[in-house]
Image (cartoon, coloured by chain):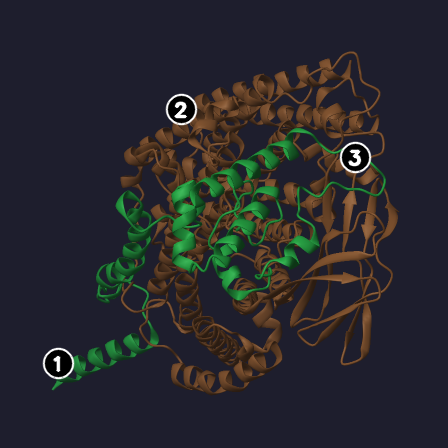
Amino acid sequence: MLANYGFYLMYLCFICSLYGFLAGILAAAWRHRRLYMSSKMAMTATFLSAAVAVGMLIYSFYQRDYAIAYVAKNSSNDLPAIFTLTALWSSLEGSHTLWTFFLTVVGAIAVWTHSKDNEHIMPYVSASIQAVLAWMFYLAITHSDPFVANLPAPPDGRGMNELLQNEYMAIHPPLLFIGYVTLAVPFAYAIAALCFGDITEGWLKTVRRWTLVSFVFLTAAITLGGRWAYVELGWAGYWAWDPVENSSFMPWLMCTALLHSLLVQDKLGHLKRLSIVLAIAGFFMSYFGTFLTRSGVVSSVHSFAESPIGPNYLTYLSGLILICSTIFAFRAPSILPSDTEKVWGISKESALVVTQFLLLSFAAIIFIGTMFPIVSEALTKQRITVQAPYFNMFAPWVGLGIIVGIAIGQLMRYQSNKLPYAKPIIFGSIVFAIPLTAFLIYMGDVMATPKTSSLIAQLVGLYLCSWAIGCLFGDFFVKLKDMRFNYGLFFKRNLAYVGAWVAHIGVMIAIIGFLGNYRGLETRTTLKAGESFEFYGYRFELERGIEIKKDKNATLFTAPTKIYRNGEYLGELYPAQSRYPTKDETFKEIGIGGNIWHDIYLVLVDFDKTDGKKVTFQININPTVRFVWIAIVIMCIGGIIALFDVYRGNKSRDVVAGAWELTT
Amino acid sequence: MKRLTWYSVLFLAFLQGGLAYGQPAPAQQLTPPTEATPSAEARAGGAFSDNNPEFRDVAKELRCPTCTGLSVLESDASFSVQIKEQVKEQMQLGKDKDEIVDFFVARYGAWILREPPKQGFNLLAWLVPSVLLCLGPILIWLLVWKRRVPANTQGVRSGEVILLEMQERLNHLKQGKT
């Protein structure tokens, strides 16, 4: 029953958003206010019915209503309550529905909370968002309908994907989807600005806010995905440069680049067209990534046609790119930079262009690396692989540029080639960096790196990061000094600066964390019960062998291992293999211990199946992984701080939109 | 003869892999089927353990055929384990790293390597990013850094420029008066 209602609701959403799109276009063309109101109402109706549809899907998950095929496929009777909810987005149809639902939420918020100055471009915004929505609902009702009936209902479902039964995976997809859908608003505003013919007052304020929200969510979501890989997959890393990860990282890079170009646009009225291009590109990339991962095109060109989603996405993406570039080609010439004098040269705006270059070329390299196997296979018929070693060849150079760019760029000033207090800050930091680097080297045990090239890379990286941190602190001090240490005023008026500063410190800490990958250690050993093993100053003692435990719906084969360092007992780790009742397969549960300088990462590879007294372990020492987690939290906090900035704007540089012509 | 042995090893390996995929082992309480992982004894029996740095060096360069984004070293999938065994066997034959990599390329194609070979069309994958990273800063230097819109009275100016201009104006006024 619910299945039918759900489908009709989705259909209603499709009709509503299609109507809203057409109404929005006509309202814009005729400048007809009431038609726009109708489009806005259509957006709201879409949101409401999508909310009810998603609510029904959640309800049927809780009812374990296996008459719905999607529920039967992704749930089972023994699934714990929390995963019953997260099972909603554990597979294609549900995650598509959730993504679409989030887009309706964001669209509804966008049309109801626009700034008063933006009212006249809102028909375009509404039309753009609903055009996307119409396509997504079309896809939902044709190719990925979550409400397909499954009659007669089976007594038990097939069960949720075991790898996804993890708290990080539970929140990773929704956060990522929110990050993606919030990019739709800058996109819609970019299209609106192009259609309108200029950047209107208040445009930047709205776009900046949505981009920041997207930045925070994407940062958090990508990291949670990495953390999930780290604790669940057992290959001792959090980032493998696989196409799925790359496709979530490219929108992040676009979003970050957009934030920096908006800064130039805000202060100087330049780079307007770049902002527009980036807003469109970021949005495009969020769908492109989905296309890559969902169509199966990544594994091979030939698996492309296997899923009906693939060709559909391809049509949509090519349509999107065609429409956007046509609009851009015709309308962009009317968007001109402000006649601000004395720009470029050696100044902060030029430094921000370097930022754009670094972020965008990084995105380009990732794009090339992700797409190359497909292109190569199509052109040369030879299958090749592009994996981590390729990306790791280029990423350090981009990272190097980012470190130097952040350190120097922060010190620069707009429209001036003078760097105030540059000498004391830069040279002071050169000195300051020496003890900090020495501390990091000593505590992180960097000198033990066996390979010389890795050692040099780490030493250079650590020193430059320490130096950049010194420069950042110097700049903060100088900014405070300029305000005569009036903290109240400083934090009241400068939250955008403070947020950026915090986020940049986060980037530096993250890079210090990434450098730990150069010196990770790994070993494998087989222990009998009662035996112990020494590695990297730690003693691992397997006391009793395998123990069998029940954890919710999983059966765990745990090998409790006691960890000692210099004879001191540190605690016990519980690496395990888990089995779920729904699938004949084992999954790894990793035992993670250690301290902030290195993680002890204990994987139970294999064990004696007869008596469980003999266990093969893989032991990894992963340096400074926790730096990365901390750094990402700091970056998100930076983004949130910047979100609270009271935007003052620069109204003189933007156009005031005209009045409605038809106000009947 | 040697060749024949290798082919039969490969054939058996495939067969084993195929069986492991085709027939899931029956569910028992204490026997999770690890995907055709050889027992610990078999692994310790070889002269090259998993911890051998030379072995790790080679295994790091070969992709796990069944996973995305991982090397065989990082993976315990059945196919990866077989490849690791083959690497060890090759090492016991006294082959060095390049020879072993060539052996795998001859067997599975360039696909088994984790990065595209630097020749032919695939050279493009290496050249484009390198050129991009090298040319970009030069372009920025030429187009942005060297370009400076001169100051005039309409624009927003830094304090020093305003001071200079005031000085100039003052001089001009002084000269005009005398």
The residue located at (40%, 72%) in the rendering is A408
- Nearer the N terminus, badge 2 or badge 3? 2
Measured as percent of width and height from the top left, residue A271 is found at 34, 52
| Left or right: where B20 falls relative to A332 | right
Measured as percent of width and height from the top left, residue A471 is found at 47, 77
Mark 2 or mark 1, whichever is nearer to me: 2
| Left or right: where A325 falls relative to A515 | left
Q: Which residue is mark 3?
A: A84
Q: Amino acid at mark 3?
A: Thr
Quadrant (top left, top right, bottom left, bottom right) of the N terminus of chain A: top right
Chain of the residue under the numbered disc 3 shown in the image:
A
Q: CA distance from mark 3 to mark 1?
A: 87 Å
Chain of the residue under the numbered disc 1 shown in the image:
B
Q: CA distance from mark 2 to mark 1?
A: 59 Å
* Same chain? Circles 2 and 1: no
**Residue A81, located in which quarter of the rendered image?**
top right
Q: Which residue is mark 2?
A: A29
Colour seen for chain B? green
Q: Is residue A185 or residue A646 the one in the foreground?
A: A185
The image shows residue A71, relative to residue A249, as above or below, that is: above
Q: CA distance from mark 2 to mark 3?
A: 47 Å
Q: Of helix, strand and loop, which one carries label 3?
A: helix
* Same chain? Circles 2 and 3: yes
Label for residue B176? Answer: 1
Q: Of helix, strand and loop, which one carries label 1?
A: helix
Measured as percent of width and height from the top left, residue B170 is found at 22, 81
Q: Judging from the image, what is the letter of the chain drawn in brown?
A: A
